[in-house]
Image: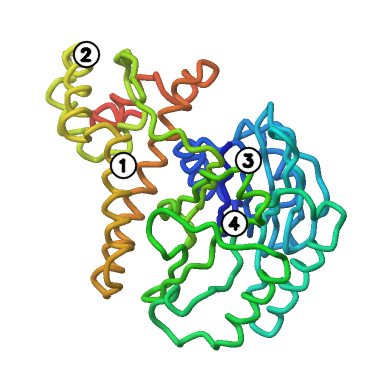
């Protein structure tokens, strides 16, 4: 099983949902825990359908802040235990019940003790004897080396986090990838993690937590894989050649299409060559940009690095929009509405036609 936890920093806009869909497509989680969703129940229901999930648990947003959401796929058994502004607590029925708690830590310094007391209250429940995993954005670090840049954290704050974990008999399960899961300007911290009790670690001795790549949010998504099987080879099927509506988002499409207006078949063929050799297929471009962004995120946070990251994020946003158009075009019900209309394509290419319209 794969559990994805992500502070997505709001899901009210199409751009934000595109980012979540990209993360879901990349990671393919069985259970998602999202914090700072800024969603109410009705919008969460729409998001559930968009993601193709079966059911969800929610702590609704108070407007423009907060909001927790746990969603899961069909075939996964999840039962609610308790919900608050700091957590969604549930039991997962996978080879013997175990406890999954999605955590969102208190962001305000003068109220940090509230999340720690909430964690202690969870330990005192009847379900405490179950194997348990708590995962999410704790909004706190455990050690000084988990922070780079900015003012040093007070030791008493770190100690309060340590004490809460000790009282709950939870230990950090470690991570794979870059240590820092949050960034803002030149400051980076490890705020997102997974912690588990001894029973859960015995139940899943090979479990791994992977710190994912930044996308849209200033937090990395983190993925807990209970029983890793290694990387799987994906064999791509032959893809039929079609007009791609996402090409219309590229300025250089006119350079390819205009000289060949009267030769539709040749235009069709040349566009696919252009897509392959110049655009390098949107999936490969997204992958390359993500690698470049990850390299910058792990390097020194200079002004040049921050500017380069912003430029890459803009390019990624354009490509993710193209990716969405790509799949909308392939939905038969929407084909004529948003894609396979070569008239739209040639109107954009040809100035004379464009003037008539």
Callout 4: 10 Å neighbours few (<14), some, many (20+)? many
| Image spot of residue 348 (x, y percent) | 29, 31
The answer to whether 79 is drawn above or below residue 125 in the figure is above
From the viewer's perspective, tell me whether residue 134 is left or right of residue 221: right
Earlier along the polypeptide chain: callout 4 or callout 2? 4
Marks 4 & 3, CB-CB < 8 Å contact: no
Label 4, label 3: how far apart the Cα atoms are = 19 Å
Q: Which residue is mark 3?
A: 31
Label 2, label 3: how far apart the Cα atoms are = 46 Å
Q: Which residue is mark 1?
A: 287
Disc 2 versus disc 3: nearer the observer: 3
Q: Which residue is mark 4?
A: 10
Marks 4 & 1, CB-CB < 8 Å contact: no
Q: Name the residue at 45% across, 33% down.
A: 229
Q: Secondary structure at mark 3?
A: strand
**Residue 299 quadrant:** bottom left
Callout 2: 10 Å neighbours few (<14), some, many (20+)? few
Q: How is the image coloured?
A: rainbow
């Amino acid at each position: 099983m794969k559990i994805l936890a992500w502070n997505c920093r709001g899901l009210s806009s199409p751009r934000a949902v595109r980012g979540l869909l990209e993360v879901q497509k990349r990671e393919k989680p069985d259970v998602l825990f999202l914090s700072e969703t800024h969603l109410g129940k009705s919008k969460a229901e729409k998001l559930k359908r968009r993601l193709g999930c079966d059911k969800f648990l929610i702590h609704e947003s108070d407007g423009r802040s907060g909001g927790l959401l746990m969603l899961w796929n069909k075939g996964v058994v999840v039962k609610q235990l308790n919900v608050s502004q700091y957590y969604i607590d549930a039991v997962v029925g996978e080879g013997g019940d175990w406890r999954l708690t999605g955590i969102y830590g208190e962001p305000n310094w003068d109220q940090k003790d509230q999340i720690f007391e909430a964690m202690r209250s969870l330990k005192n429940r009847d379900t405490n004897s179950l194997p348990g995993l708590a995962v999410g954005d704790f909004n706190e670090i455990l050690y000084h080396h988990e922070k780079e840049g900015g003012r040093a954290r007070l030791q008493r704050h770190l100690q309060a986090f340590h004490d809460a974990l000790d009282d709950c008999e939870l230990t950090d399960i470690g991570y794979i990838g870059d240590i820092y899961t949050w960034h803002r300007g030149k400051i980076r911290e490890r705020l997102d993690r997974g912690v588990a009790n001894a029973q859960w670690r015995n139940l899943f001795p090979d479990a791994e937590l992977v710190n994912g790549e930044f996308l849209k949010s200033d937090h990395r998504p983190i993925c807990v894989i209970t029983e890793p099987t290694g990387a799987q080879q994906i064999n791509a099927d032959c893809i039929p050649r079609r007009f791609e509506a996402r090409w219309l988002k590229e300025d250089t499409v006119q350079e390819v299409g205009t000289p060949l207006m009267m030769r539709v078949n040749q235009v069709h063929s040349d566009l696919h060559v252009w897509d392959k050799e110049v655009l390098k297929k949107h999936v490969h471009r997204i992958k390359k940009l993500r690698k470049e962004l990850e390299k910058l995120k792990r390097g020194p946070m200079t002004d040049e690095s921050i500017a380069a990251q912003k430029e890459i994020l803009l390019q990624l946003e354009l490509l993710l929009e193209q990716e969405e158009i790509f799949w909308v075009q392939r939905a038969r019900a929407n084909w004529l509405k948003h894609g396979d209309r070569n008239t739209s394509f040639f109107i954009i290419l040809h100035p004379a036609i464009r003037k008539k319209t």
